[in-house]
Amino acid sequence: GSVDKCPFTSNVAGGGTRNTSWWPNNLKLDILRQNSVAANPLDKDFDYAEAFKTLDYAALKKDIAALMTDSKDWWPADFGHYGGLMIRMAWHSAGTYRVFDGRGGGGAGQQRFEPLNSWPDNGNLDKARRLLWPIKQKYGNKISWSDLILLTGNVALETMGFKTFGFGAGRPDTWQADESVYWGSEHSMFPEGNETRYSKALKGVNEKGALGSDYSKDTDLKNRELEEPLAASHMGLIYVNPTGPDGNPDPVAAAHDIRTTFGRMGMNDEETAALIVGGHAFGKTHGAAPDSNCGPEPAAAGIEHQGLGWINKHASGKGADAITSGLEVIWTETPTKWGNGFLESLYNNEWELEKSPAGAPQFVAKNAGEVIPDPFDPNKKRKPTMLTTDLSMRFDPAYEKITRRWLTNLPELEDAFARAWFKLLHRDMGPIDRYLGPEVPKEELIWQDPVPKVDHPLVDEKDIATLKETVLSAGIEPSRLIAVAWGSASSFRNSDKRGGANGARIRLDPMNKWAANNPDELHKVLNALEKVQQKFNSEASGGKKISLADLIVLAGTAAVEKGARDAGHNVVVPFTPGRTDASQEQTEVSSIAFLEPKVDGFRNYGKSTARGRAEEHLVDKAQTLSLTPPEMTVLVGGLRALNANHGTSQHGVLTKRPGVLTNDFFVNLLDMETQWVDAGSDGELWKGIDRKTGSEKWTATRVDLVFGSHAELRAIAEVYGQVDGQGKLVKDFVAAWDKVMMLDRFDLKKNDKFV
Ligand code: HEM
């Protein structure tokens, strides 16, 4: 597919030349309006966790298992078993996850929607999902598509003799494509275009397959860096090109790309090798003929195909004639049975480059016998074959070290694959509190960001009132209590449900070192709060305790209340105790590091980057906090009034009463008596000048001024800047503040609230 195809222009239902065509650089707020109630066909009070409780899980698993060998004529099962296809479906669902922003992954069932349903790499997975439809239909809303797709991969493994690590359900469905994910900027999908997202393309296909050549000494490879935050090597692929980097069938070079792409999926070398070796113990690849035989992908196929794509005109178009990747490889002698056949074949054979019937480079075992079964003809046998990227597991020295060990130690491979597969499927689930069902493993896993269980009575209303007074008189500016509470809670990202105030990880490495958290100031605030905590805990009766995680939020909340009080509003800002404090040992420093905000417009921290303008970063951050445009607006305006900027910077603090929760930010931003003039040279800072006197009143950044310049944001800003805006600002700010503080409280089983 390519975006340059001649479009048919309609003049109804949103057709015609759009704002995004006229002003492509305008800030877009659409990603803040996704998954609205209006788009959801389920009842307003539908609670997936509750519905799942009524599911007969064992019966569902039995039906999925039976499906594996119930071959349908419209899409016959290779070797009479859909296991390979279903593992690939689950793997491709989860494998889009990337660490940088936590987006992608199987947690929202996005494989059903564009672009993923039509990616070349997801070829014929439309059939896999359609095979599942009768089961989805039978169990209805008790099982989501997101869960069903991943669970089916698990059951596939089990039916072929592999013991999995477990399964956690609990992924509510979404009803539209997630537009927040940056998939790349190329205009064509793999393998059509030669556009690359790498800083360096690999030149010149090495026809010999370059076994033994050493690309790792090659500067082309050393400087080959993948654009952030992408995790796949091409537009339209989940991970890497199976024929090697840019089509160079060089296993050593391919290892470089595998390490990068799987690393960005959150996998280390051992996990990566386990996944590839374990996954390719099953099934086959499909390349009976060139893919010019195939029709368009689902999103571009005729309406009569009902969401199916890649209609194949070669012979029967299915079964033995199937075309998916264009590669024709069968890895083991037992493609529907777990075992160490992949590594045995990899190491016991020598490999030479060949072409698949579709013309793609792949490897065949030299001088080997025909020992590999045919998927449909019991009388035929084939020679062992491998993909370029499979050979990486042997010819890359680091992968070799790992896989040679497993060659003679199957139980170790089994443990590594079971754990890596479980991590793959659950990487974007967030805290263990979200996991549902009878197969949730008991073992605490570091990548789940575990927090201790509450093992003491919690504070009551009276304690909360007392603690609020104590923290406000602990010698810390209220605005700094707000800044720290914000830093703690806003580390949450809805994309993979990581971060947040629970655990109080803001006091641990690496969060306590983040520049956005202003380490010196943070240290001071935490010291003061720890003293309050110790005093309370030592004096409280009946073993009652408050965690630091709770106290951080409570202190910010008390400061917000004070700000409202000083503005004449006696409001109670909600506070729900129950957070606990994680230890450093429970904290995976290397992966928490990915949560670091490089830019945070809510704190007026950072500025535009090569990736986007400051206001785009603000919207992106707001999306990971699952905020709506009004929530984002009121939070920025309120936080500025409360003087909560990073490092008490005064940019955007458009008030004469900093620290008071007023609507001054909006009133003064929209004041026609102020003229904004450039204060620097880099388009990041402006001065607000009094038109009459010429005196400087304010300074403001892009994320401040955007609320006056962007038409839709200005429309919201006006609501808060009007005569009736003050009371509304306080009410809405308190609600949005509470929402952010509570985003990670999955212990309260709020997991269905924000998708
Ligand atoms: C099939 C590539 C990793 C599981 C395939 C196919 C390709 C491919 C090209 C053939 C698709 C077709 O033509 O039908 C790769 C590459 C990988 C990788 C380049 C990484 C370097 C994995 C992982 C898993 C996995 C991590 C699972 C843990 C499977 C399975 C099939 C398959 C089960 C067989 C599908 C069937 O029988 O229909 N892979 N794969 N692969 N892959 Fe992978």
Image: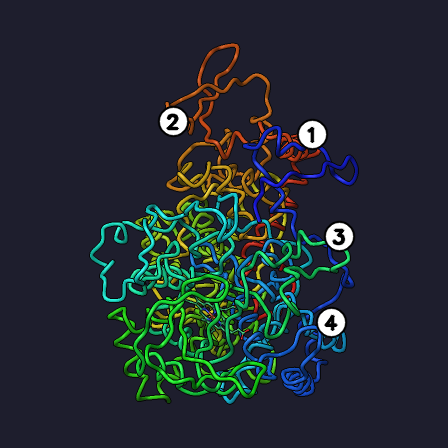
Q: Amino acid at mark 4?
A: Asn
Image coords of residue 744 (percent x, y): 53, 62
Q: Is mark 1 within 8 Å of ligand 1?
A: no
Image coords of residue 111 (percent x, y): 60, 62
Q: Earlier in the sequence, mark 1 or mark 3?
A: 3
- The image shows residue 339, relative to residue 351, as above or below, that is below
Instruction: Tell me the quarter of the picture where residue 254 sits.
Output: bottom left
Task: Tell me if 69 is positioned left or right of 599 in this view.
Answer: right
Image coords of residue 41 (percent x, y): 77, 60
- The image shows residue 571, relative to residue 319, as above or below, that is above
Image coords of residue 676 (percent x, y): 49, 20
Q: Amino acid at mark 1?
A: Val
- The image shows residue 508, relative to residue 368, as above or below, that is above
What residue is pinned by disc 4?
141
Which is in the foreground here, disc 2 or disc 1?
Answer: 2
Instruction: Tell me the quarter of the picture where residue 508 sits.
Output: bottom left
The residue shown at (64%, 71%) is 318
Which is in the foreground here, disc 4 or disc 1?
Answer: 4
Question: In the drawing, what numbered circle is on residue 682?
Answer: 2
Q: Earlier in the sequence, mark 3 or mark 4?
A: 3
What residue is pinned by disc 3?
38
Element class at badge 2:
loop
Which is in the foreground here, disc 4 or disc 2?
Answer: 4
Q: Label 2, label 1: how many angstroms apart (C-alpha)?
A: 35 Å
- Characterize the local packing of mark 2: few (<14), some (14-19) or many (20 or more) Cα atoms within 10 angstroms: few
Q: Label 4, label 2: how many angstroms apart (C-alpha)?
A: 52 Å
Q: Label 1, label 3: how many angstroms apart (C-alpha)?
A: 31 Å
Q: Earlier in the sequence, mark 2 or mark 1?
A: 2
What residue is pinned by disc 1?
723
Q: Label 3, label 4: how many angstroms apart (C-alpha)?
A: 18 Å
The residue shown at (35%, 86%) is 412
- Characterize the local packing of mark 4: few (<14), some (14-19) or many (20 or more) Cα atoms within 10 angstroms: some
